[in-house]
Amino acid sequence: MTPLPEHLRQANRARTQEAEKRARTALTELVKAGKPISFTAVAHRAGVSTDFLYRSPQLRTRIEKHRTKIGAAPPDAADPPNDASTSAVVRALSARLKRQQEAHREEAARLRKALQVAQGENLDLRRRLARYETD
């Protein structure tokens, strides 16, 4: 394989440096805004791939450092409040879901068994038909 011409190497280097600059800027903006830091968030904001961030040792180190600083993400505002009525509803729905799952499992097992019986009967009838046709 022939080496790249110098002008293409320079263009590649410039493109990489520009992408690194965008990633550093995106990381700084996310930190200042107090947003959760992740490789995906930085990549999306900078317009680069997550693979690019993982392959860049300096960017990777900075993102991991900021990611551990923030810790766990704050609770989502869409989470329901923790009151007794909500818990009771969740428990009731969970129990109902478990009963339905068990009923579906039993029905699937019953249908599987019926299918096996039907396939056995089908095979038996084919064998009997083959015996009559050869005579």
Image: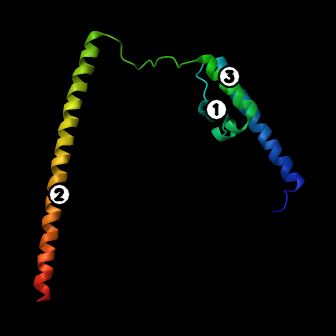
Labels 1, 2: front one: 2
Label drawn at residue 79: none
At which x and y percent is residue 31? 66, 20
* Secondary-structure class at tag 2: helix
Residue 129 x/y as whole percent: 12, 79
Quadrant showing the N terminus: bottom right
How is colour applied across the structure in the image? Answer: rainbow
Question: Which residue occupies the foreground of this view, 130 or 27?
Answer: 130
Q: Residue at x 70, y 23 (%)?
A: 28
Q: Is residue 31 left or right of residue 100?
A: right
Measure the C-alpha gap from mark 1 to mark 2: 54 Å
Say which residue label 1 marks: 45
Q: Which three-letter amino acid code belongs to the residue tagged 3?
A: Lys
Q: CA distance from mark 2 to mark 3?
A: 57 Å
Vertical relation: 102 (above or below) 11: above
In the image, 43 versus 106, the foreground residue is: 106
Question: At x 85% / y 50%, what residue is drawn?
Answer: 9
Tag nearer the camera, 2 or 3? 2
Name the residue beneath numbered marker 2: 115
